[in-house]
Image (tube, helix red, strand yellow):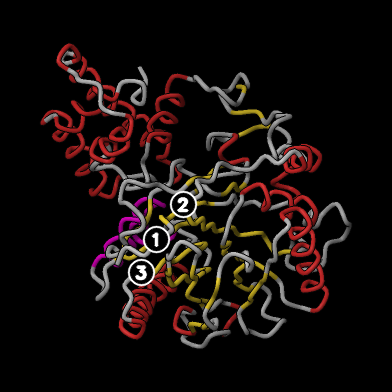
Amino acid sequence: MNIRDNPGLAQVLADSAVMKALLGANSAWRRTGLGPTPGRLANVQSSRVMVLGWAMFFAAAFLPACQRLPVEQEELALPKIVDGFEPEWGVNEVKYMLKRHSGESSRVSKSPNGQARVESQSLNPWASPDACQALVSSGQRLKHAPDKARFATWNIRWFPDGVAGRASAPAQGTDLNWLACVIAWLDVDVLALQEVKADALSRTKLESVVAELQGKTGGSWSVALDQCPAHNGQHVAFLYASHKVKTSPFVQYAALNPRASACADQLRPGLGSTFTFPGGLDIHAITVHLKSGVTERDIDLRRRSWAALTDVIATEVKESKDSDVIVLGDFNSMGCHSCELPYGNQQELSELDRQLRIGESPARRVGADFPCSQYFQQQPGLLDHVVITEATRELSPTVRAQVEGYCQNLECESFTGKEPLALRRLSDHCPLVVELTDRDLD
């Protein structure tokens, strides 16, 4: 049974007291602290699937009374269905969880132990450099409505070497031409980047990606990095279509480094600018890269950055007299495994969501359509996020960010055997894409 193919069922689920009771019970269970730590992940998934299964069973009794919703209302019903689960649960995650429970999958094959195997897809820009080149050369792009402004965020893993030091061989580093190709295919207007090196050689390689991108798109592109010294290994940056988008002077937010000094201890500041689009949208965008790690110290440093972020957003809104702010980046929402009461990714995200809501200019995390944005040791994780002020009318609360790349191809399944080529040559993270209406609706 497919929820998208049965929107009448979706509405029954959305309005059903039974569904709300089941989801409430599930939410209460998660708040007990017995939620998805790494060792309990399988049980969490099974419990969520069971809740959805029971809900669909009860709702099925009412199917004769279901009225098919107009297509444009289908998405509006779905957030109600998953109320009580994490906010990023969308159509694809519900489908993913049901598939995972049943062993069914449309884009990945299964090994005997039930894990996904990576397979080449000829019409997939993430399968190989040649596949991407063929698609982009033929004019194909990720579907992009003309009245939408497209933002994305992508951690490109120690660009351009793929490692903290220098790549020991060309095959270890980032494939520069492939990177430019998939950015062209994504058809983004503004791309927030993390883990960019800033030494002279790295800047030269970044400029070569920009030049290649200009050749593939026929437009002008610009890049802006934070102002931390080059020896601060990882930097945040914006890459944007300067032939289409205008920017204000870029601002560095020292407070987002939890050490309260922009470049202290190899941690990162935020970087922001107001981007103005041809249709009238103007919005202040900030890219962030928070502290990685699963210790109590790591989560405490991330919490400091969360608190600073709410202050930065409020200050930006006050000074610009414009309530539209979007934050994109790698939040490293890994949970805390060494805390006295260990907890996982979802508990950390719930805490982040509460912090965003209580700010002077309340904000919300935009849900993703798949439950991962990164792979580590063949296992998926959701580390990258988009945050937007609640007052921003150009992004409907029902719109979800799109997870692209091999994360989508694998449907966020764990995999066996050889890792995807894009994971090796591009990044261990996948792009997260979100579209806003290109009009000023303030």
Q: Quadrant of residue 40?
A: top left
Looking at the rendering, the stretch of residues picked out in magenta corresponds to 338-357
What residue is drawn where x is 32% and y is 65%?
389
Q: Secondary structure at mark 1?
A: loop
**Residue 439: image tag:** 1
Q: Is residue 413 magenta?
A: no
Q: Quadrant of residue 336?
A: bottom left
**Secondary structure, magenta segment, majority class:** helix
CA neighbours of label 3 inside 10 A, class few (<14), some (14 to 19), many (20+): many
Q: Which residue is mark 3?
A: 324
| Circles 3 and 2 in contact, beta carbons < 8 Å | no
Q: Position of residue 376 (x, y in %)?
A: 60, 48
Q: Secondary structure at mark 2?
A: loop
Q: Which residue is mark 2?
A: 147
Q: Position of residue 11 (x, y in %)?
A: 21, 28
Amino acid residing under circle 3? Asp
Amino acid residing under circle 2? Asp
In front of the other: 276 or 107 = 276
CA neighbours of label 1 inside 10 A, class few (<14), some (14 to 19), many (20+): some
Distance, label 3 to label 2, CA atoms, is: 18 Å
**Residue 217: image tag:** none
Against 305, residue 343 (above or below) is above
